[in-house]
Image (cartoon, rainbow, N blue to C red):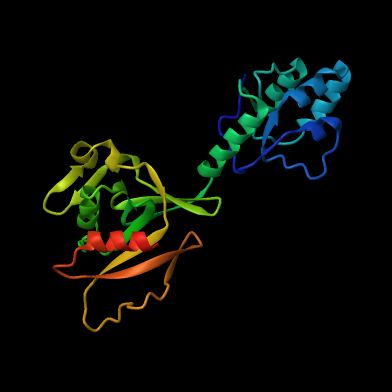
Amino acid sequence: MERNEDREINCNDIIRPGLQFVGYYDYFVNTRIQIVGNAEWHYLNNLEPEVRRERLEKYFEYDLPCIIFSRNLQPHREFMELAREKRIWVLRSTRVTTRLVNKVINYLDRALAKTTTMHGVLVDVYGIGILITGESGIGKSEAALELIKRGHMLVSDDAVEIKLVDGVLYGKSPYITSGMLEVRGLGIINIQSLYGLSSILEEKTIDLVIHLEKWRDEDDFDRIGTPEYINILNIPVRRLRMPVKPGRNLAVIIEAAAAEF
C-alpha cells in the first residue's frame, strides 16, 4: 500500500465517525484522528455491500489524517480499497475503544503542546517544582547541588524544556543533558552516579520561579511578600527575587520558600 508518509497531525483531539457513516456531516472535523470502535464497525458490517461502499466513498472524500480500528477489528474490504486509493493510513489496536481514545488524546496533548525553552535549573523541593533563574555564574547550579545533597531532586540544569498541557506547565531536561549538572570549577557532574536514581526526576510541574540577582545596596528587594509573577507560555507563575551575596545559604532559603508556597 502506497501511503502518504508526510501526512501531518495538528489536532489534539479525536472523533468517532459513527454519524458520518450514517450520512450526517455537519460539524464534522476531518482534521482529527478517526477512531472506529465496535459500534461503528458493526454498523458498517450490517449494511449491504453496495450501501457500505456508497457511505464510505462519501466519507473518504474528506482529507483524513489517519484511521485507527480498536479491538483489533478487521477493516472491511471496501474500507481498505478506498483508503489505498486516497493514501490514508489505516491502523489497528488491540485496546478497547475507551482506553484507546484516552491513550491517543493524552499522547496528542503532550506531543502537540505549546513549548518553550528557558535558561535555568529546575528542581523538586518538598514536591514543589522550582525554576531557579539568573545570569550565568550567579550560583544556580551550586544552589541546586546543595539542594540535591539535602535530599531534593534535579529535573534539569542549564536548559529547561517547558510544555503547556491542560493549563499546567511541565518542565524536563533535554535528553542529552538528563541527570547532569554543570558546576563551575568541577565541570559536568553525573548526579545519578553520585547521589543515586532517587536524586533525579524526569519531569516536574513549574510552580515557582526563584530569580537570583547580585546583591546591590541600592536595590529595593521585597521584604513584605508582595506577589510578583512572570508569564511562561501565557501562564502566570509566581516569582521571588532573591539577592545573592557571600555567606547566604541559598539552599536553605529556597527550602523555606518551597515550604511556604
Residue at 19% in and 56% down: 142
Question: Residue drawn at (65%, 24%), measured in percent from left and top?
Answer: 96
Q: x, y (%) of residue 2? A: 61, 22
Quarter of the image where the N terminus is located: top right
Nearer to us in this view, 148 or 193? 148
Q: Nearer the viewer, residue 62 or 150?
A: 150
> Image quarter for residue 50?
top right
208 in relation to 172, above or below:
below
Residue drawn where x is 11% and y is 53% of the image: 185
Task: Name the image quarter holding residue 259.
Answer: bottom left
Q: Can residue 7 be seen in this view?
A: no
Q: Is residue 168 left or right of residue 96?
A: left
- Give the percent coordinates (x, y) of residue 121: 30, 54
Whole-percent x, y for residue 157 in the image: 28, 50
Nearer to me, 36 or 141: 141
Residue at far bottom of view: 218
Residue at coordinates 76% horizontally, 22% vertically from top-left? Answer: 41
Q: How many marks?
A: 0
Q: Position of residue 216 (x, y in %)?
A: 21, 78
Looking at the image, is 228 positioned above or below residue 74?
A: below
Tell me the quarter of the image containing the C terminus: bottom left
Relative to 52, 177 lies left or right: left
Q: Is residue 85 visible?
A: yes
Image side of residue 6 versus residue 46, left or right? left
